[in-house]
Amino acid sequence: MFLKFWGDGSQESMDLVNAIKVRDTGNFNWTFIFILAVVFYVYWSEIHKKNYPAVQAGLALYGVHWLYEIANAIIGKCSGYPLWAVSNQSTTFILLVGVSWELSMMFSLAGIISFKMMPQDRTKRYFARGKFKGISCKLMVALEMALLFALFESFLAATTNNSFIWVYKWWGVIPVFFTTYIPFFLASNYVPDMKPKARNIFLIAEWGLVAVLLAVLIPCGVI
């Protein structure tokens, strides 16, 4: 099957999750370094060009991504299985039960990509007719990117090496689209245009919370 839309609740899926080795270096290889270098290049290129809104977009989405991954790992610890997981054989390094190194680095760039997909005039609205003021380009691009990512995740869930694992039968493309990816891309598309004080508070609070949670929960063996 090319796409998978829902978890199957199978014993195979449960066994795959139970076999996950978080932060194990058994599959480590040099692509780890190359991917990190690419991410550094992209961010420093934007900083060099003083394109700070793009950097803020990237950091906004990436912070939300980490909060979701931490929450997913906590769910896995408390209920037995996370909402999503990555398999050992699909990655060089698993950071948390639901995110591999390659996936996390992709999300570090996803906010920049989404931001750059918007028109230069970020006040532009689509489908304005009569009294209807139309849909903000920020919202439109967020919905488009969320749909694209949700469908791609359904492909990953259908791969024969189980790149992505959904255990629960009620979890799949639709909840992923609404509860995960839409918030991701709303953050990247709206945060850069917030008032400076509000934007700074958002980014500092977001990343401060991520740092505290990782510093506390990893040593405690929770995630």
Image (tube, helix red, strand yellow):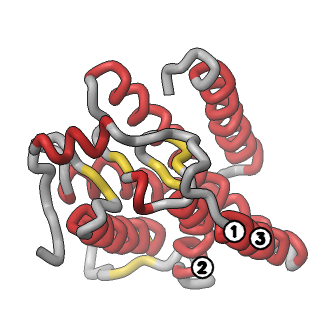
Residue at (49%, 21%) from the top-left corner? 222
Q: Is residue 54 visible?
A: no
Q: CA distance from mark 2 to mark 3?
A: 21 Å
Asked whether 164 or 57 is in front, the reply is: 164
Label 3 element class: helix
Crowding near pointer 1: few (<14 within 10 Å), some, many (20+)?
Answer: few
| x then y, percent, for residue 207 | 68, 38
Q: Is residue 215 above or below residue 109?
A: above
Asked whether 151 or 46 is in front, the reply is: 151
- Labels 2 and 1: the sequence-earlier one: 1
Q: Is residue 160 above or below residue 195?
A: below
In the visual, does 25 lie left or right of 182?
right
Q: In the figure, residue 18 lies in which quadrant?
A: top left
Asked whether 165 or 66 is in front, the reply is: 165
Q: CA distance from mark 2 to mark 1?
A: 29 Å
The circle drawn on residue 30 is 1
- Labels 2 and 3: the sequence-earlier one: 3
Observer-side mark, 2 or 3, equals: 3
In the visual, does 97 lie left or right of 153?
right
Residue at (86%, 73%) from the top-left corner? 50
Q: CA distance from mark 1 to mark 3?
A: 11 Å
Q: In the figure, residue 92 lies in which quadrant?
A: bottom right
The circle drawn on residue 172 is none
| x then y, percent, for residue 54 | 69, 69
Observer-side mark, 2 or 1, equals: 1
Q: Which residue is mark 3?
A: 37
- Labels 1 and 3: the sequence-earlier one: 1
Q: Which residue is mark 2?
A: 116
Label 1 element class: loop
Observer-side mark, 1 or 3, equals: 1
Residue at (49%, 79%) from the top-left corner? 124
Label 2 element class: helix
